[in-house]
């Protein structure tokens, strides 16, 4: 079991070394990166916005129902919603959502190319297939995932405001005051740093499972499942590590 794990870790880093080798034609990578930013990033805005809206709404309502004691000022509802979204939910939940959506897509795409021998054809033509297929995906996720996190933060706070005022648990004035109260800009930086780590994990782990696949269509599905599971576990693990390092 341990030997198998170490073998997988070693193969992962060997693949990364191949991915980050010098590209043959950088302009081709630029075009591919733009395509991946649309496919992996822009196409994820909708699902991130919807989930973030309801996430903010639920956080606000739950905070309101757990702070009904009259000694608590109502603006704490907005403050609690803001800090929960900034510190945890937007970066981590966005990472887990993208692990399922983007990760499975990357693994299945590269896995299908492997089983249909398209990767072998690239290698035959002298192309560094790992760098050509994986590096644009890594760059695209590193560039666009922080944007998705910022969208998630904004939409989540708006969702909390709409839910709180609609349910009558807080006034618009108190909610906005709570959002602004004792704001720490570093929390946004913290969320972006976590997002960058999560983006790298999603892109590389999913690509690794797709690139090393052996078999046929059944194995492609299995690789996609492994990519989502392993990416999610690593995201949660690094969430704990980064929280301890960045907030302690």
Image (tube, grey):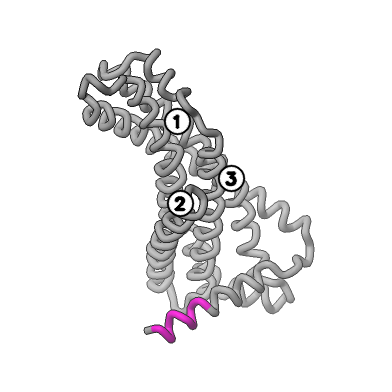
Give the mark toward the camera: 2 or 3. 2
Nearer the N terminus, badge 2 or badge 3?
3
Q: Is residue 33 left or right of residue 9?
A: right
In space, the residues marked 1 and 3 are separated at their CA atoms by 16 Å
Mark seen at residue 243 = 2
Q: Which residues are magenta?
A: 2-9
Q: Secondary structure at mark 1?
A: helix
**Magenta stretch secondary structure, dominant:** helix
**Rendering coords of residue 212 (x, y %):** 52, 75
Q: Residue at x 26, y 26 (%)?
A: 64
Q: Crowding near pointer 2: few (<14 within 10 Å), some, many (20+)?
A: some
Q: Residue furthest bottom?
A: 3
Q: Hey, which quadrant is residue 79 in on the image?
A: top left
Above-or-below relation of 41 to 53 = below
The reply to whether dot 1 and dot 3 touch (C-beta < 8 Å) is no
Tell me: residue 80, above or below residue 28. Answer: above
Find disc 1 in the rendering and name its residue. 155
Query: Going from the N terminus, do you reach mark 1 or mark 3 first?
Result: 3
Q: Is residue 146 above or below residue 111?
A: above
What number is the disc on residue 125?
Answer: none
């Amino acid at each position: 079991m341990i030997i198998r794990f170490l073998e997988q870790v070693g193969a992962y880093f060997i693949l990364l070394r191949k991915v980050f080798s010098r590209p043959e034609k950088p302009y081709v990578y630029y075009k591919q990166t733009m395509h991946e930013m649309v496919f992996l990033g822009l196409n994820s805005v909708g699902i991130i916005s919807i989930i973030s809206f309801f996430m903010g709404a639920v956080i606000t309502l739950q905070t309101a129902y757990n702070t009904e004691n009259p000694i608590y000022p109502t603006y704490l509802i907005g403050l609690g919603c803001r800090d929960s979204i900034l510190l945890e939910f937007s970066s981590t939940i966005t990472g887990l959502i993208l692990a399922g959506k983007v990760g499975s897509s990357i693994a299945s795409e590269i896995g299908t190319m492997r089983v249909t021998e398209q990767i072998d054809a690239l290698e035959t033509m002298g192309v560094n297939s790992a760098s050509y297929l994986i590096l644009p995906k890594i760059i695209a996720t590193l560039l666009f995932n922080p944007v998705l996190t910022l969208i998630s933060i904004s939409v989540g706070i708006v969702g909390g405001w709409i839910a709180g005022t609609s349910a009558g648990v807080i006034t618009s004035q108190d909610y906005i005051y709570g959002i602004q109260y004792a704001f720490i800009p570093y929390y946004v930086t913290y969320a972006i740093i976590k997002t960058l780590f999560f983006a790298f994990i999603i892109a590389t782990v999913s690509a690794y499972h797709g690139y090393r696949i052996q078999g046929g269509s059944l194995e492609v599905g299995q690789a996609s499942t492994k990519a989502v599971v392993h990416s999610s576990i690593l995201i949660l693990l690094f969430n704990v590590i980064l929280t301890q390092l960045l907030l302690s």
